[in-house]
Amino acid sequence: MGGSHGCPSCVDSFGSPEALTSHIQAKHTFVCPICGSSFRSRHAADQHHNTKHTSTRCSECDREFGSENAMEMHYNLEISTTMKSTVR
Ligand SMILES: [Zn+2]
Ligand SMILES: [Zn+2]
Ligand SMILES: [Zn+2]
């Protein structure tokens, strides 16, 4: 039947607030892959990402990308080709 401490993010409920807290930390904590900060909701993590890590613009050619991953892949490629082409 579950306890009286219901998880706000899913249907699970627990007998003690401690159990609920550890459940939330294990199941509903969103960790920022860039700086390691953790958040209670995806929305909070997204908001953090949008305000702190909006560097989806390539610093080499100023092109913008939809995701940081895409930008990083492009950036790494660009750096490696630039290094090769500037070798004299
Ligand atoms: Zn839950
Ligand atoms: Zn972060
Ligand atoms: Zn670039």
Image (tube, rainbow, N blue to C red):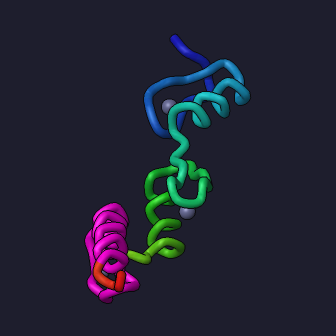
Q: Position of residue 1 (x, y in %)?
A: 51, 11
Depicted 82 relative to depicted 6: above or below:
below
Depicted 3 relative to depicted 50: above or below:
above
Q: Residue at x 66, y 33 (%)?
A: 21
| Magenta range | 57-84
Q: Is residue 80 left or right of residue 21?
A: left
Q: Residue furthest top?
A: 1
Depicted 59 relative to depicted 49: above or below:
below
Q: Is residue 71 left or right of residue 45?
A: left
Q: Is residue 46 left or right of residue 26?
A: left
Depicted 79 relative to depicted 36: above or below:
below
Q: Position of residue 38 (x, y in %)?
A: 60, 51
Q: Position of residue 20 (x, y in %)?
A: 63, 29
Residue 73 found in image quarter: bottom left
Q: Residue at x 62, y 23 (%)?
A: 4
Characterize the magenta stretch by its predominant secondary structure. Answer: helix
Q: Residue furthest bottom?
A: 62
Q: Residue at x 61, y 21 (%)?
A: 14
Which residue is nearer to you in this view: 69 or 32? 69
Quarter, ligand 2: bottom right
Q: Is residue 62 magenta?
A: yes
* Quarter of the image with the C terminus in it: bottom left
Which residue is nearer to you in this view: 8 or 68? 68
Q: Position of residue 29 (x, y in %)?
A: 55, 42
Q: Residue at x 47, y 39 (%)?
A: 9
